[in-house]
Image (cartoon, rainbow, N blue to C red):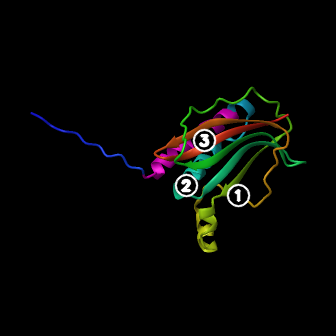
Amino acid sequence: MTGSYTRSASASFTITDARYVGGRVGADLRLLHNLYGKPGLDNIENYAEEVAILLDRGFLDTVDYGFRDTATNAWKFRLRYKATVGGQLTDSRPGSFPDPVDLTGYGFHSHLTYSSAFWLLPSSEQAGVKESLPISRTTGTAPSALTGTTTTGHGYARNGAGVSRDVYVAY
């Protein structure tokens, strides 16, 4: 008996692919929790799902998670995820953070920016997207990253899309 097997590759990015990437971001956040006690475990799944939904719809530009000085609105430690399509995508293992940082007195913070595709939507559709997300965000100014080191080259991807990650640590 003979048979054949064919498989076709699809370049379409699905919500399943987006949840894979979001799950990798969630793994990083769980490692942050283990090292620094924040973010709260109850919020991590919501952050991961927010990334997945926005990435799937093409509405994510960047999302930052980290610890900042609330008095100066400056990052002390930040993970930044930038939506990436095609090109040089990397699918790394979660983690690979620099040596632990003393974050005593710094509060956990997250800041998200939407893609240009999101801003092209009518305001009523923008509101609908925001309402569908598991995280309710308020408008605010992004914390600054003044003097420090940034480590790049890490990312999470699947089926042609994903996020690149950089880690910023202030001096």
Dot 3 corresponds to which residue?
A: 25
Q: Which of marks 1 and 3 is nearer the N terminus?
A: 3
Dot 2 corresponds to which residue?
A: 53
The residue located at (47%, 52%) in the rendering is 15
Q: Distance between the residues labelled 1 and 3?
A: 18 Å
Screen quadrant of the N terminus? top left
Q: Where is residue 129 in the image (x, y as percent from the top left)?
A: 59, 64
Q: Earlier in the sequence, mark 2 or mark 1?
A: 2
Amino acid type at image mark 1: Arg
Q: In this view, does 21 lie to the left or right of 112?
A: left
* Image position of 101 with respect to 25: above or below: above
Query: Which of the pair 17/108 is nearer the observer?
Result: 17
Q: Where is residue 106 in the image (x, y as percent from the top left)?
A: 83, 40
Amino acid type at image mark 2: Ile
Q: In which quarter of the image is residue 95?
A: top right
Q: Distance between the residues labelled 2 and 1?
A: 15 Å
Magenta part, dominant SS: helix
Q: Position of residue 67 (x, y in %)?
A: 78, 41
Q: Is residue 104 left or right of residue 10?
A: right
Amino acid type at image mark 3: Val
Dot 1 corresponds to which residue?
A: 137
Q: Range of the magenta residues?
A: 12-33
Verify CB contact (< 8 Å) between mark 1 and mark 3: no
